[in-house]
Image (tube, rainbow, N blue to C red):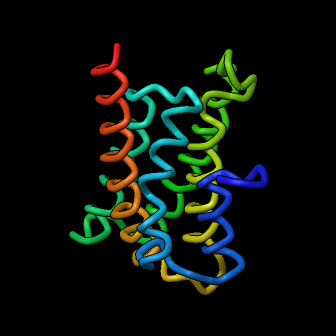
Amino acid sequence: MSNGKTAVDEVIRLLVVENKSFSADEVMKKAQEVGRAIKENGTEKTKLREYFGQVKSLATALKAGTKTLDQARIELYKMKARIAYDTQRQGENKKTKRPKLETLKKLVDLAVEKALKEGADLKKEVIEFSDFFECVMGYYTFEDKKEVDHE
């Protein structure tokens, strides 16, 4: 992206400034760039899968009704705390001198804040973020595979 903006910054702009949802076409179309940015920032696949698994599991539980909204709210707060901890613990990307999980943290933090915002439909927000995250995960894996094929 130009002028120093990252793909995640553009997603943040769409979600916050333009009040789009994670399921909006403009946002979903950014999933490939976000997956690439997360990969390039040095996020390890196991960490990405860990957070994707948590989001997917929460979305599935909300759809099935096996978790209440209060339980989901607690899970989201815990997820935000875990990624803050993991970001500190994972250290910096040697190339960028930025925390390896910085890009993923920005995305997860935004999704959690959006879902917990007063008046938000928590269930809808989590499900839409889960769908977006699934696309990001797919594109990350695609980028990861491309890298392996070129070695």
x%, y% of residue 129? 43, 64
- Looking at the image, residue 82 lies above or below residue 131: above
Image side of residue 109 versus residue 59, left or right: right
**Who is closer to the viewer here, 96 or 43?**
96
Name the residue rendered at 73%, 28% in the picture. Answer: 98
Image: 130 above or below 98: below
Residue 10 position, x and y percent, is 64, 63
Location of residue 50 (image quadrant) = top left
Q: Residue furthest left?
A: 64
Q: Position of residue 70 (x, y in %)?
A: 48, 68
Q: Quadrant of residue 62?
A: bottom left
- Is 21 situated above or below 111? below
Q: Please give the name of the residue rendered at 35% of the width and 57% of the height, measured from the top-left corner.
A: 58
Q: Residue furthest bottom?
A: 119
Direction from residue 114 to residue 147 in the image, left or right: left
Residue 31 shown left or right of residue 94 in the figure: left
Which residue occupies the foreground of this view, 67 or 130?
130
The number of numbered badges drawn on the structure is 0
Residue in the picture at 65% in, 65% down? 12
Name the one closer to the observer, 132 or 112: 132
Pick the front one: 74 or 118? 118
The residue that appears at 60% across and 33% down in the rendered structure is 101
Residue 47 point in image, percent of width and height:
45, 30
**Quarter containing the C terminus:** top left
